[in-house]
Each structure stands twice: as C-alpha cells, then as structure tokens.
Amino acid sequence: MKIAMIGTGYVGLVTGACLAKIGHRIICVDRDNAKIETLKRGEIPIYEPGLSELVTKSVAKGKLEFTTDLAEAVQAADVIFIAVGTPQADDGRSDLTQVEGAAKQIAKAANGSKTIVVKSTVPVGTGRRVGRILGKHGDDHEFEVASNPEFLREGAAIEDFMHPDRIVIGTQTEAGAKTMRAIYAPFDNGTLPFVMTSLETSELTKYAANAFLATKVAFINEMANLCDATGADVTELARGIGLDERIGKHFLQPGPGYGGSCFPKDTLALTIQAQEADTPTRVVESVVLSNSHHIRRLGKKIADFCADSWGVDRKLPLLGKRIAVLGLAFKAETDDIRSAASTVIIPLLIKQGAEVIGYDPQAAEAAAEQVPFLQTTKNMDEALDGADAVVVLTEWQVIRDVDWNRAKHKLASPVVVDMRNLYDPHTMAAAGIHYASMGRPLIEPDLTPSPKLVSVG
Ligand SMILES: NC(=O)c1ccc[n+]([C@@H]2O[C@H](COP(=O)([O-])OP(=O)(O)OC[C@H]3O[C@@H](n4cnc5c(N)ncnc54)[C@H](O)[C@@H]3O)[C@@H](O)[C@H]2O)c1
C-alpha cells in the first residue's frame, strides 16, 4: 500500500521505517527542512537503537522516501498517517494545533478519496474533529478517518513496533476497518490480538494505558519512599507483590518519577478531559500530583544525604559543591529529554548553590540547551573528576557498568545517590561509598583505608 506519514519524529520515523520493512511504500513528510535534509543524507536525526540500519535498508529498496512536500506525498498515497506532535498546552490540555493543521493541509492537497489514520495521541473526539476539518476543506472527496494509537517505547521502539502485544484500531465504517487490517496484515499471525473498536474507544485506550502505567510507577515510588522511612526494602516488596499475576512484575521499579514525552502530558490531558466531562478521574489526578511531589522532594533527599555523608549541617550543604549527574535522558537508549527528571532535579540542585556537571552518552547537548547553568559532557570520567557527590538519574548500561572501586578515586568525596537502584548496596558499602538508593536500607560504608590504586584509568 502507498502510505504518507505526516510528521517524521520519534513515532513517525519509526512507524514509517517499520511499515516499509513489512512491504508498504512510505513517504515520510516533515515540515522541518533540516530534519528531512538529514534523512536524505542517510543520517538519523534522533538516537534510537537499530533505526539507522532499518531506514538505510528500506531507502535502498525504494520503499522509504523523505520529503517536505506534503501535497505531493498526500496525492501519491492511499492512506495518510498523522504522526505529528501533541504537546502539552499551557493550560495542561493536549495542544492539537499540529494535528488540525496537518488535517487541513491533507484536505486541501487531496486528489481523491483517502484514509486518514490518526497515530498521534489525541483526546477523545479528535478523530471526529479531524473528519469535520477534512469535510470542510477537502472538496467533495471521501475521507475515512481511523484511530491507531502507538504504544512503542523510545529506546526499544523498533522491537515494540515489530512485536506488539496488540494493535488497537478505531474506525467508523467496515471499509475503514478493512483498510486498517490490510495495512497490518503482515503482523496477523493468528495469535496477535487486533482490538477493533470505535474511534472514541481507541483514542481513550491510549490515554488509559499510559495512565495505568503511570499509576504503577507513582505507586511503587510512594512505596519506595515509605520503605526509606521504615527500613523496609522496596526491591523485595516489588517482588513480593509483582509475583501476584493480578499485579504483574513490570513497571514496579522505583525511580526519579515518570518523565518523557508521553506520561506527564497524557495523564494531565486525561484528567482535564475527564473533569470537563464531569467524570473526574481522581486516581489519575492523584498520580499526577504524586509524581510531581516525588520528583520535587528528591532535591532535598540528595541534599540531606550529602550533608549526612559529609558530616555537615543540613542547611545549604550543596553550596559551592560539585555534583556529577550520570544520565540526563528521561530513560536509557534515547536522546529524548522531554520532561526528563534531570530537567527538574538539576535546577533544584543548582538553586541550592551546587555546580552541576551532567554526563549522558546521547542527551548531553539537548540537556545543556534546556537547563540553564548545567555543564555537560559525553565523557563520564570528566563528570566524575573531583565531584563531591554523584547523582544517578538514567539507567544507561554504561552507567550500570561503572566499577565504583575504581571510579571512587576520581571523586573528591565518595557519595553516590542512585535514583535507579542500579547497584548493590552491600557492594557499594564494601567499596567505601556512602550510597543511597530508592527504598532500600542504607548500609554504613566500610571506610577502612585501602591500598591506593596506582592507575584508575
Ligand atoms: N515519543 C513517543 O515515545 C511516543 C509514543 C507513543 C505515542 N506518541 C505520540 O505520537 C505523537 C508524535 O510524537 P513524537 O514523539 O514522534 O513527536 P515529535 O515532536 O518527535 O515529532 C513530530 C513531528 O511532526 C512534525 N510536524 C508537525 N506538523 C507537521 C505538518 N503539518 N507537516 C509535516 N510535519 C509536521 C514536526 O516537525 C515533528 O518533526 C504524539 O502525539 C505523541 O504523544 C509518542
């Protein structure tokens, strides 16, 4: 099938490349000229494992093209996916300007009947709104509108797209459902569930999925804080509840609060739409609150632990101290820093007078642009050199693999606050490190002097 993908961001590019891999002919469109020029040169504007190879192969086979000319792409296609951004507006709602703009452009460019698939995450009712825009601006052409939310995770996007748990499709007619089934026919192995439903249910399913996952994250973070206060261990607690199949073991790792380009904006948009429908979602409202409290209290947790470890007063202990932050992206294997914990926690440290040097293998530049006074590096040793304390925010493998027996010799003071529970507290204590994590008991470090290492390289 000939498909145009409007919006070549994290979702549009991955969806385009994966649909090309299963045999469709895809034209990816973006209004960002620099992005399209980069793609035409064979480079990938984002970091996503495996994407470069996939794009290169599909381009070579003539299955994948890039353009800024939306009209040309629309005219050449039978099906048009809208995968543009739906960022959070100032009032917390989902900003639909890009979706509505794309719908209008599609309508004006259309040269015949088309199926328009909304892949962007949109509030209930948007598909019908898109239908009205198409009807108003699209001459007499027939437009079929479908909803097909995306559940991929950045960092594992290709794996997720190619091996989905389910495909959710909302349509208004049998013909629309048939077209959508045909697009995904290569995935139809007889066992993959296709949830065929209405536009409304499909749109809301995406929000409900994100809200549920965010609830699990907020819940386990609250349990971790309670463990910290009571001496219980959240890792064992998570195992203890996660083995109950009704609960499930996924999404029970405590961390610095959920972030990224989806959960924060989607949970908030859901609560607002629910309030407007006079059916408030009190659980999700609490999750939004809980998450923002959780992130904000981490600034104090870091400062208090540093003060106690350094043996100084808890009042303004970070003033003039050098803090290394390991991991700036909102999660591992992505360069995305949208609503990353780093963008909230680092300003809290800087506000307390700390000098912060952040390390990330992929997101250093983006973070430096967004967070005032943050210095960044792609070289972890440079960040650790002379640091008074280390804060771990992202679970990159390279950060997981740090050998603290060696790395501690780079630090001015062996203090590590780990928001991802990447290391074993006993091993850290044995290495002589003051180590705090999330919801796991503190263990006094072994501070007996060890023979000095000759080289720490
Ligand atoms: N990023 C994720 O992990 C993820 C996962 C599932 C769903 N989603 C949803 O998918 C949608 C896209 O997210 P994203 O992260 O890919 O966004 P993004 O900001 O990375 O990409 C959106 C792209 O659309 C382009 N664009 C906007 N209007 C356009 C127009 N009229 N014509 C051509 N191009 C246009 C922008 O230039 C941009 O490159 C959002 O609704 C998001 O909530 C995202």
Image: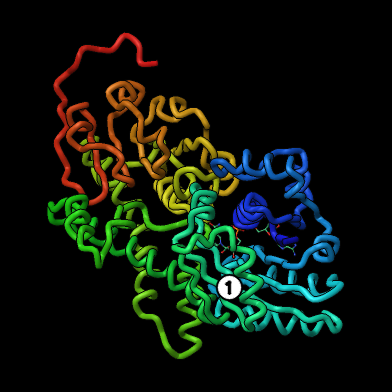
Relative side of 278 to 225, left or right: right
In depth, the one of 445 and 59 nearer the eye is 59
Reply above or below: 203 against 401.
Answer: below
Relative side of 434 to 134, left or right: left
- Please tell me in which quarter of the rendered image ligand 1 is found: bottom right
Residue pictured at 24% horizontal, 35% vertical: 310
Q: Quadrant of residue 442?
A: top left
Residue 109 point in image, percent of width and height: 85, 70
Circle 1 residue: 122
Residue pictured at 44% horizontal, 30% vertical: 383
Residue pictured at 30% horizontal, 37% vertical: 416
Residue pictured at 79% horizontal, 50% vertical: 33
Report whether the residue tagged 1 is closer than 8 Å to ligand 1. yes
Reply above or below: 44 against 265.
Answer: above
Quick one: which residue is furthest to the top in this view? 454
Q: Quadrant of the C terminus?
A: top left
Q: Quadrant of residue 137?
A: bottom right
Q: Amino acid at mark 1?
A: Val
Residue 298 point in image, percent of width and height: 33, 53
Residue 455 point in image, percent of width and height: 35, 11
Q: Quadrant of the N terminus?
A: bottom right
